[in-house]
Amino acid sequence: MACAKILVVDHEEEGYEALKPGLFRHGYEMHTTRTVAEALALAGAHDYKAVFAALALVDETPLVEGLHAERPDLPIILVLSPGNAHRIPPKVLRVADNTIGKPLALEPVRLMLDRTLELVTLRARQRAQRQLWQPLRDLLSDPATPAAEAPRSLEEVLASKLRDIVPGLGAWGRGALYQAVLSYVERLLLTIVLRECRGNQVKSAEILGINRNTLRKKIRDLNIAVPRGQP
C-alpha cells in the first residue's frame, strides 16, 4: 500500500529523522528540507497530504503562500519550539490547521497526522457532496420554469436532475444514497412550501396533504427554520 507523503520544512531536521521509521510503519513517508525554495520545489513534484512547518519559517517567509499556490487545500501543521509556543502571531494561526510542540515524539505526531488527514477527507467529501447536490438544490430552490423552456412534469424534471448527479454518487459511499435523496428532497420541499405559505403550518400541511402534527414532527426532525408568520 502506498504511503501518504508528508513534507517537513524546518531548520532543525535532526529531530525528524528518528521519527521516519516509525511513521513509515504507520503508512507515512516523511520528506524533510531546511529551505523554503526546496520545500516549494518538492510541493510541486509530490502529492503531499500535509506539511509540518516551523513557526519561524511560516512567520518570516512566503512559505505558506507558495505552498497554497501549489496546493490551496494543503493542510499546514505548525511546529512550535519551547521558546515560541506562547508567541504565535494571529496571522500565523489563521493559516495553520493544527499545531504541535517540540520535542516531537512518534505517537503524538502519528495521532496528529491521523486527525489532520481525517479532517482533509471530511472536507473533500463535503465539497463533493455540495457539488453533487447543487443541481437538485437549484431545482427546488428556484422552481420557476424559464419562459423559453417548455413546461415539463415534476417527474421529468427530477429525472433529468438526478441523471445529472449520477456520475458523482461515489461521494456518498455505499448504501447511503437512497436515504440521502429522500431526506434532502423532503427537507427542501417542506422548506419551500413553508416559505410560500409564510410559515402558516395549517396551510402548508393542506398543500402537502399531510397532518399538521406530522408536519410539525418533520420540521423538528429535519431541523427546518419556519419563516416568521402564522404558526
Image (spheres, rainbow, N blue to C red):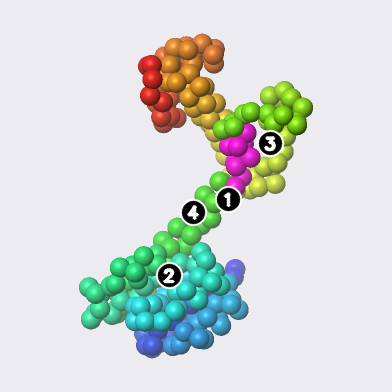
Q: Nearer the viewer, mark 2 or mark 4?
A: 2
Q: Magenta segment: does it hold 74?
A: no
Residue 199 x, y percent position in the rendering: 42, 20
Q: Quick one: label 1 or label 3, which is nearer the N terminus? A: 1
Answer few, some or many: residues within 10 Å of disc 3's Cα (few below 14, many 20 plus, some between 14 and 19). some
Say if 226 sits above or below 120 in the image.
above
Residue at numbered disc 1 = 128
Residue at numbered disc 3 = 161
Is the C-beta separation of discs 2 and 4 under 8 Å? Answer: no
Image quarter in which the N terminus is found: bottom right
Question: Mark 1 is on which residue type?
Answer: Ala
| Quarter holding residue 138 | top right
Residue at numbered disc 4 = 122
Quote the CA–CA distance across marks 2 and 4. Answer: 16 Å
Which disc is residue 76 wearing?
A: 2
Q: Quick one: label 2 or label 3, which is nearer the N terminus? A: 2
Residue 118 vs residue 143, the one in the foreground: 143
Q: Nearer the viewer, mark 3 or mark 4?
A: 3
Question: Mark 4 is on which residue type?
Answer: Leu
Quote the CA–CA distance across marks 2 and 1. Answer: 22 Å
